[in-house]
């Protein structure tokens, strides 16, 4: 599955994204609100508080979840990111969120975040 142009625009332009992972029994965990960006034809999320952040741990353990943003709701797979994509993802975060100041944007950009970056791939 791929994102439609409309979905990419809506999710990419949404200020925030709600993400939830699936439990092993198939039920959905509670949603957590985070930032997300569009870089090219892909959508990405990053853990601002490192690999120990609860939503990130659960998303990587599960591998699947659901997102809501900009009127779009889709099941997704959480995948790793090609290292070559990281500069474009940083740029997208700066372009979208720099108005919040360097401290907060710095938590989701720079050399510490590639390990806590996930690509969102639609599954339904």
Image: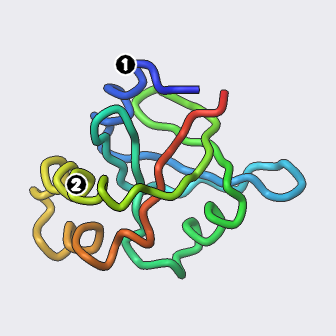
Q: Check disc 1 and report its element: helix, strand or loop.
A: helix
Q: For residue 49, which quarter of the picture?
A: bottom left
x, y percentage for residue 77?
Answer: 62, 45
The residue at which mark 1 appears reads as 5
Q: Is residue 84 left or right of residue 105?
A: right
Residue under the point 31% across and 26% down? 9
Separation (CA) of disc 2 from disc 1: 20 Å
Please tell me whether residue 26 is drawn above or below residue 98 in the rendered image: above
Residue at the spot x=55%, y=50% of the render? 19
Instruction: Please give left or right for residue 103 compared with residue 58 in the image.
Output: left
The C terminus, quarter of image: top right
Q: Within 10 Å of the Cα at label 1, are there few (<14), some (14-19), or many (20+) other Cα atoms?
A: few
Q: Say which label, 2 or 1, has the lower sequence index.
A: 1
Residue 56, how many percent across, how many down?
A: 55, 67
Q: Is residue 72 above or below residue 82?
A: above
* Residue of label 2: 93
Mark 2 Cα shell of 10 Å, populated few (<14), some (14-19), many (≥20): many
**Which quadrant is the N terminus positioned in?**
top right
Q: Is residue 61 left or right of residue 45?
A: right
Q: Quadrant of residue 112?
A: bottom left
Q: Nearer the viewer, residue 85 or 107?
A: 85
Q: Secondary structure at mark 2?
A: helix
Q: Is residue 87 above or below residue 41?
A: below
Give the answer, above or below, for where 78 lies relative to 109.
Answer: above
Front residue (pair 50, 16):
50
Residue shown at the point (37%, 71%) measured from the top left: 48
């Amino acid at each position: 599955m791929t994102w439609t142009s409309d979905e990419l625009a809506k999710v990419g332009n949404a200020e925030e994204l709600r993400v939830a992972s699936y439990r092993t029994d198939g039920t959905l965990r509670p949603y957590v609100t985070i930032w997300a960006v569009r870089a090219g034809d892909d959508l990405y999320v990053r853990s601002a508080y490192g690999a120990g952040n609860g939503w990130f741990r659960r998303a990587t353990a599960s591998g699947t979840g659901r997102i809501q943003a900009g009127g779009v709701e889709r099941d997704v797979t959480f995948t790793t990111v090609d290292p070559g994509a990281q500069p474009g993802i940083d740029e997208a975060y700066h372009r979208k969120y720099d108005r919040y100041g360097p401290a907060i944007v710095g938590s989701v950009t720079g050399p510490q975040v590639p390990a806590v970056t996930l690509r969102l791939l639609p599954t339904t």
